Amino acid sequence: MTTIADILAASDEAMGEIWRDDNGYVSIQNLPPWTGYFGGSYVQHCGIGVCRVYFLAGLTMGVDFPDLSYTPTGAAATFDLGMAVDVPQPGDWGIIDWGGNGWGATGESDHAVLIIDTSNWPDYVVTREWNTTPDGRGADYLRSPGLFTVFGRPRLNAAPPKVEPPAAVPS
């Protein structure tokens, strides 16, 4: 059984594994769970970085977490698969909308992150992100909950109950 500690340890491993070369090729785009998925083309790798972390921790894409490689469909799948949560915990993922359209605005989603610390909730969460530095390596950031369209929790041992988007955006 995968634990939150396993996910956080896998994110530490991924920090040294994920980067982008000068031609735009991402170091993990042909590694599991992505083998053969993208070919040699340039990819935005925030979501595939988060998925790689879950894969390294022993989880299965499409079962324990959705495909986050395209953030609008990853955000929608988070709701559709019953993985959305109102309050994140370390090891969860988050989908950001830089335009600030708010909770549930899945079609406006821009960026996938891994949540690594929630001790200052609801003021901010600490995220681990890829595709935000010039070389595409991972970095940690403080993010306001108001930036997120959804938080999702991987299935570690049982499916969580489905959560509908709240009427008001957390602030």
Image: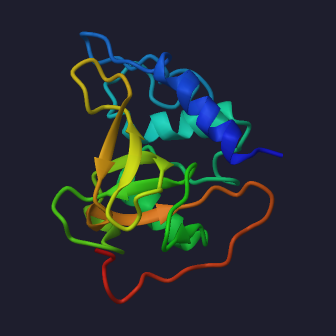
- Which residue shows up at 37% across the image and 68% down it? 122
Residue 63's quadrant in the figure? Answer: bottom right
Residue 130's quadrant in the figure? Answer: top left
Name of the residue lying farthest toward the top:
22
Q: Quadrant of the C terminus?
A: bottom left
Residue 95's quadrant in the figure? Answer: bottom left
- Foreground of the two, 7 or 51: 7
- From the viewer's perspective, is 72 left or right of 147? right
Q: Position of residue 153 (x, y in %)?
A: 59, 60
- Foreground of the two, 148 or 170: 170
- Which residue shows up at 32% across the image and 34% down it? 44
48 in relation to 118, above or below: above
33 in relation to 27, above or below: below
Q: Position of residue 87 (x, y in %)?
A: 49, 69
93 in relation to 17, above or below: below
- Which residue shows up at 61% across the image and 72% down it? 82
- From the viewer's perspective, is 100 left or right of 136? left
Q: Position of residue 77 (x, y in %)?
A: 51, 64
Can the viewer see residue 70 in this picture?
Answer: no
Q: Position of residue 21 (x, y in %)?
A: 31, 11
